[in-house]
Image: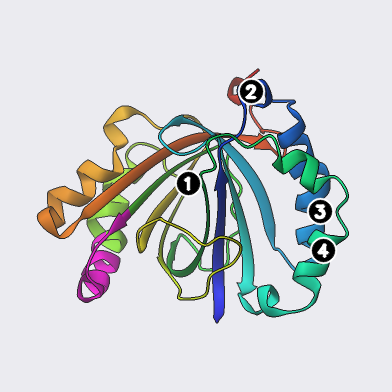
């Protein structure tokens, strides 16, 4: 599918790998991320949660999703000798690989994901509400979040194409970027349900800090 595409890859892994310089994070930053750049990724970042989510959420941007249908994608994994060892650190067996079509990005429709902190709300809503959600984000939602210092706001919806083991995440994603940890008052679920009420179901919030690449602000560093 033509993009822009936001690809999120989430998984749990063992407690000893949860440190900032854990084997898992180092592999993503130094091996897997660069491999995806070679395939055409526009940006690569990994976030560790302070609210919600699994142990790590990696966020990638692509022009489209066609790259995942090419022989180069499985070949990349087959050529990574470190991957099987690192993936063995996962715990609980839970993971999610989700492809989203970016429907709205403010400000600017071609900006790269580049933030020390993100807040992401995965949720279900009828397709018939998409136009109204986009309109709300473009007006009232953007105004509300701008008052708290949001850098970028994106609205995305899942595409039918699956990769890896697929995803259990709901259809919609409200994705925001921040220079600092967003305040509790900038709660995406509260903001969205204040407008759309019962149309918003299966909410799965996430707030996390950038573990790789290096955070811009030393206050964002976690050890």
Q: Which residue lies at the image location 52% right of the left edge and 36% below the top edge?
A: 92
Q: Position of residue 24 (x, y in %)?
A: 72, 35
Q: Secondary structure at mark 2?
A: loop
Residue at figure coordinates x 22%, y 51% from the top left: 192
As drawn, the label of residue 151 is 1
Direction left: furthest residue:
198
Sequence-earlier tag: 1 or 2: 1
The residue nearer to you, when weighing 16 against 5, is 16
Judge from the rendering whether residue 59 lies leftward or rightward of residue 88; answer left or right: left
Foreground tag (4 vs 2): 4
- Badge 3 crowding class, 10 Å Cα cut-off, few under 14, some 14 to 19, many 20 or more, is some
Q: CA distance from mark 4 to mark 3?
A: 11 Å
Mark 4: secondary structure? helix
Q: Element under label 1?
A: loop
Res. 76 mark: 4
Foreground: 51 or 77? 77
Q: Earlier in the sequence, mark 1 or mark 3?
A: 3
Residue occupied by mark 3 = 34
Q: Nearer the viewer, mark 1 or mark 2?
A: 2
Q: Earlier in the sequence, mark 4 or mark 3?
A: 3
Discs 4, 1 touching: Cβ within 8 Å? no
Q: Are marks 1 and 2 in contact (CB under 8 Å)?
A: no
The answer for how far apart the CA atoms under marks 1 and 2 are is: 19 Å
Q: Which residues are magenta?
A: 123-136
Give whichever of discs 4 and 2 has the lower sequence position: 4
Crowding at mark 4 (Cα within 10 Å: few <14, some 14-19, many 20+)? some
Q: Is residue 218 left or right of residue 76?
A: left
Which callout, 4 or 1, points at the residue further toward the start of the chain? Answer: 4
Is residue 81 positioned above or below 220 on the image?
Answer: below
- Residue highlighted by disc 2: 221
Mark 4 → mark 2, Cα distance in angstroms: 30 Å
Tell me which secondary structure the magenta stretch mostly adopts.
helix
């Amino acid at each position: 599918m033509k993009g822009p595409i936001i690809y999120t890859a989430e998984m749990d892994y063992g407690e000893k790998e949860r440190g900032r310089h854990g084997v898992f994070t180092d592999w993503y930053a130094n091996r897997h991320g660069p491999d995806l750049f070679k395939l055409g990724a526009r940006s690569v970042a990994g976030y560790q949660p302070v609210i919600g989510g699994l142990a790590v959420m990696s966020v990638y941007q692509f022009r489209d999703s066609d790259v995942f249908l090419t022989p180069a994608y499985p070949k990349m994994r087959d050529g990574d000798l470190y991957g099987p060892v690192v993936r063995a650190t996962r715990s609980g067996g839970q993971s999610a690989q989700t492809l989203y079509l970016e429907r709205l990005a403010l400000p600017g429709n071609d900006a790269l994901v580049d933030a020390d902190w993100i807040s992401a709300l995965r949720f279900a809503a009828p397709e018939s509400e998409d136009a109204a959600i986009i309109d709300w984000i473009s007006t009232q939602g953007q105004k509300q979040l701008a008052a708290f210092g949001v850098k970028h706001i994106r609205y995305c919806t899942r595409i039918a194409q699956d990769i890896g083991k697929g995803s259990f995440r709901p259809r919609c994603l409200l994705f925001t970027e921040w220079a600092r940890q967003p305040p509790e008052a900038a709660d995406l679920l509260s903001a969205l349900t204040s407008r759309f009420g019962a149309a918003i179901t299966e909410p799965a919030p996430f707030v996390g800090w950038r573990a790789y690449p290096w955070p811009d602000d030393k206050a964002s560093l976690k050890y």
